[in-house]
Image (cartoon, rainbow, N blue to C red):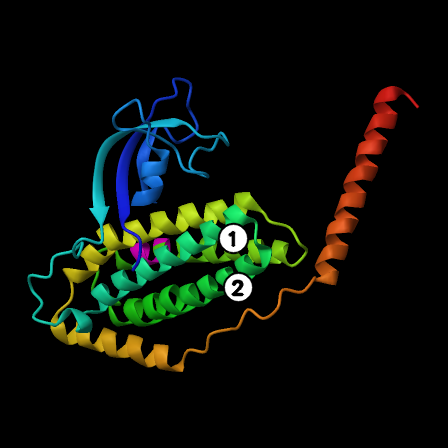
Amino acid sequence: MAPQLLEIMYKCMHNSCYVNCREGILTVEEGRFKELSSKDEEGVFKSPRGICRMGFSQNFQVVKMQHLGSGVPFDQGTSQLDPSENPLIILVEEHKAINARLEKIEEHLKKRDLDALWVATRELENDLVLHSGIKEEEVLFGLTQGLLPFGETLQDIIKEEHREIITLLHNFREALEIGELNDGIIDSVIVSLRGHIRKEDQEFFEIIDKCLNDEIRLNITAGMKAVEEKFVRVEAGVRKMNVKQLSKQEHYHDQVMAMREAGCDTCCGH
């Protein structure tokens, strides 16, 4: 069973916080929220890793909080379809599975298990390619072309977020190939992906749903099932050291050290 997620509207309690986390909305697993909650102050919790851009945890005050996944986040009043045939509900359910995948990745991060992260992030990459790149961008966007108000603009925003997340994930996996665990990159993947899912579930899908009839919904569902049947997941395989990537990294390190030494010689007058 996927973990229960909370959506929290918060306000940062740090008086000198001016780095984009004064207030906002975040999604966190319910058990994790309990761990972060203050035992002394009601409604106060420590910010999860990667939220505060100052690089350390802050006290956040809960402004509003609700459970996610307790119902469908958009109006189905015009649809007579069974939920299993509604493409937007299918995508929402896949979002829950992706959030569960992120929880597993966070567990591996705590253990600093590079090999487990190598496998888990490959599985996440497969999920995102099929779900975001094919089902959403090719099938959903393709079959709703011209139906949405400001459709191209909205779709471009979603596509750009897909690209950013996939790029970050790829960069994280490249670092694993040379034995490095880049917490900053994977934290950005997790935070960005959770925020992206919330945006789609509670905003974007609602806009799409209002523009569809059941015939189009069924066509989208059929298209998504067809691409899923043909999709071939890429196996992670054994994590091996990328010699070329490591050589580049070492060469870059040597260049940086040479520049530092040259700068030191200059400033010391030698």
Please say whether residue 83 is visible from this viewpoint: yes
Task: Tell me the quarter of the image containing the N terminus.
Answer: bottom left
Graded by Cα atoms within 10 Å as few (under 14), some (14 to 19) or many (20 or more), the crowding at tag 2 reads: some
The image quadrant of residue 221 is bottom left
Answer above or below: position of 31 versus 230.
above
User: On the image, numbered disc 2 is attached to which residue?
Assistant: 119
**Amino acid type, callout 2:** Val
The magenta-colored residue range is 152-157
Q: Residue at x 31, y 54 (%)?
A: 153
Residue found at the very far right of the displayed protein: 270
Q: Residue at x 51, y 53 (%)?
A: 168
- Image coordinates of residue 93 in percent, x first then y, are 26, 63
User: On the image, numbered disc 1 is attached to which residue?
Assistant: 168
Report the number of discs.
2
Q: CA distance from mark 1 to mark 2?
A: 16 Å
- Image coordinates of residue 194 in percent, x first then y, are 36, 49
- Could you tell me if the residues under marks 1 and 2 are in contact, i.e. CB atoms within 8 Å? no
The image quadrant of residue 71 is bottom left
Q: Magenta stretch: residue 154 in it?
A: yes
Residue found at the very far front of the displayed protein: 39
